[in-house]
Structures are given as C-alpha cells and as structure tokens.
Image (tube, rainbow, N blue to C red):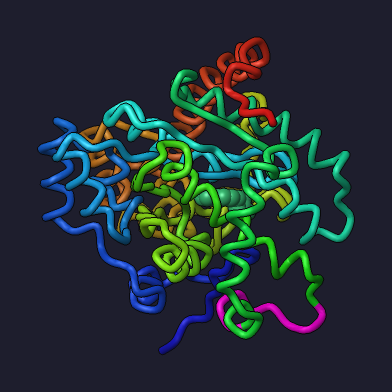
Amino acid sequence: MTKDFVVTPWEVKGDIDYEKLIRDFGVKHVDSKVMQEMEKLTGGLHYFLKRKIFFAHMYFDEILNEAKRGNKFYLYTGRAPSGPVHLGHLVPWIFTEWLQDKFGATLLFQIPDEEKFLFKENLSFGDTDKWAYENILDIIAVGFDKKKTKIFLDTEYAGHMYKTACAVAKKTNISTLKSLFGLNDSNNVGEYFYTCMQSVPAFLPTIMEGKQTKCLIPCAIDQDVHFRLTRDVANGIGFPKPATILSRFLPGLAEGGKMSSSIENTAIFTTDDENTVRNKIMKYAFSGGRDTVTEHRKHGGVPENDVSYQYLTYFMEDSNKLKKIYEDYKSGKMLTGELKEITVEVINEFLEKHQKKRELAKGVLEDFMLRD
Ligand code: TRP
C-alpha cells in the first residue's frame, strides 16, 4: 500500500512517511548514539530530541565532534516573510534557541524576502517588508541571545552575499535545479537563482571568522533539498559542508499535512487570543476519539491520530504528565473534550508568554539586525 504525500519547500501535504523521507533524502536517523553524545555535551536532552520531533540529520555528529574539541560552530536558520507566524514555524526556532544556549553558538537568521517575492504571484516587496518586521518580532520572542544573533533581510544584506551566491550559481546547472526542485520552463529565472541565496548563510561562518568554520542548520525537513545542493557545491568553492538537524511538521488542526497559513482554520497564529485558540481547537482539532462516549469508554481513543494530543507532544514539556494523558486517552478514561481542554490551556499558557515577549521585542529589534 502506498500512501500519497508530497514534501517540497513549496508544498507539504498528505500522510507523511518520515522513514521514506530519510531514505529518499539520504539523511540519517537521530539515533541513540548521537543522542548519547549530545547528552554528554549538554548535560541533558531537549524533549524535542527525546520525542523524535527532531528525528533526522546530516553530519550532526561532526558538529558534536567540533564542540567536543572546543571549536566554534555557527547555527543558521531562516524564515521567508509572506504572512503571520504560526505555532509550526516556532518549532525549529525553539530548538535553535536551546542549541544556542547550550553551545553558546552564533546564530545567523536569514529573512529571504526575495524568496516569497519571487514565488508568490501577488506579493510585493512592500508586503514582504511588513511581514519581515512582524515575523522578526516572533523570532526575537523565542529568546535568542542578542549578542550572538544576527538577523538579516536578503535584499538588504545582499552586498555581503552576492559573490558567494554567484559562486554557488556557477556550480549549479538548470537540469539539477529542475530535478531537485521540480522547477520547469514556466518558472521565472529568480526562482531558479533563489536557492543560491539560501546556500550563502551556510558559508558566512567561514567568511566571518576568516577560517574554515562549520555550520549547523536546524530546520523542518522540507528545506533539506536546499542544503543537499549546498553540500554538493561547498567543497568545490572552498567551504565546509553544512550539517543539518531536521524536524517533523507540526500537524494542522485538520487531519493530515502540516500546519499552514494558507489553509483557513488549520493554523494557530502566535497573535491569536485565548478565545480564538479555544474555538479553533474545540471546533477543528481532528479527534482520535470514538463516535460516542460509550464506544470511547469501551475501546479508548487513538492518541497517534489525535491532533490535540500531537500538539501536547510539542508543547507539554512534562513527560510524565504527557504519558499519563496518553494512557488515559488510549484506555478510554479520558474523553476528547477533556483532552482538548488540556491542550487549550497548554497552548494559551505558551502564547501568553510569547505575546508578552513579542511586545518587548519591539524595543530591541535593531539590536538583532545585521543591516548593510
Ligand atoms: N526557505 C525558507 C522558507 O520558506 C526560509 C529559509 C531561508 C530557511 N533559509 C533557511 C529555513 C534556513 C530554514 C533554514 O521559509
């Protein structure tokens, strides 16, 4: 039986087979050996690792070796500004913040405003400017260290990136781009060039330090294709290959696929108020419960299919509490309504804190920016 699903940087849909992605993308499992090494270095593991939310990697073991030897490495991630930030976007950022804290690493945060300008028919640079500002508030709210975090817009910082982007472009032919990204003859030339710009920050650590410096990219697995290309060209133009650590997608409220801003009522945005969050979860969160209370009590629910339960795996840190909820829901002791009630509370508590930090970010935004 083959299930239909798609995972590209522009589209994620269907019932995603993550094991198949590991094989197709040629990346590795975050296995117990890597986790043990990590635990030795950091004195503990983030629950995203324990729960396999970050489940795959490439060369992450080399980054750990670098850290063991006391060598510097950089972190790099990004956000294309085309709309509001939802909970799914925060997942890699929360993990990146934890890594920055544990390793004291400098973080480069790319805002590729040209990406969305090029790929989205109706989006102007006026729009991307507005969303860049809004999105950067969310990024800062995650808690990055302002002394060690550099956020930049591609169209502003391009002067420092363009030569390196050209070096990548020179090593990249159209047929590679067509097969890697599924582009065709109707795509505009900017869409072909864009990936070269997404490669550059992986090389900036070496440029900034003036010596070979490794880079670790935490991101959702849909971005992996960009960095496969980056790795393919890296050595040939004098840079080390970047490492990645890759996450699953936070599901949308409806069944299947990832949380997405473009599908109405499937996303919880960082600026949603308490009631909006409550209504969305109560009304739309796909339930793994049975049709009637009697049946539910008798057969129990299916936490694996239940979106509220899935959200708790991302946002409830207390693993004992989570385990109890899993067992009670599975046995039928806990009903869908009760599970949703807990989820509403957990998410609202998270968002209340996030929104406060987001307000404060307005006063310190410039401290984080790398302007040209
Ligand atoms: N292409 C990403 C997006 O669509 C943005 C991005 C740029 C990014 N550089 C990155 C994401 C590095 C993860 C890691 O949002």
- Of the 4 image quadrants, the one containing the C terminus is top right
**Residue positioned 27% across, 66% down in the render:** 28
- Of the 4 image quadrants, the one containing the N terminus is bottom left
Q: Name which quarter of the figure residue 66 lies in.
A: top left
**Residue positioned 48% across, 22% down in the render:** 349
Left or right of 52 on screen, residue 310: right
The boundaries of the magenta stretch are 179-186
Q: Name which quarter of the figure residue 23 lies in.
A: bottom left
In the image, residue 183 lies in the stretch drawn in magenta: yes
Dominant secondary structure (helix, strand or loop) of the stretch shown in magenta: loop
In the image, residue 121 lies in the stretch drawn in magenta: no
**Residue positioned 62% across, 85% down in the render:** 175
Q: Is residue 15 above or below residue 129?
A: below
Percent coordinates x, y for residue 48 in the rendering = 32, 43
Res. 223 visible in picture: yes
Q: Is residue 241 above or below residue 4?
A: above
Left or right of 170 on screen, residue 330: left
Left or right of 17 on screen, residue 362: right
Percent coordinates x, y for residue 272 in the rendering = 67, 30
Percent coordinates x, y for residue 329 in the rendering = 32, 47
Percent coordinates x, y for residue 336 in the rendering = 45, 45
Instruction: Depth check: give the residue in front, 113 or 96.
Output: 113
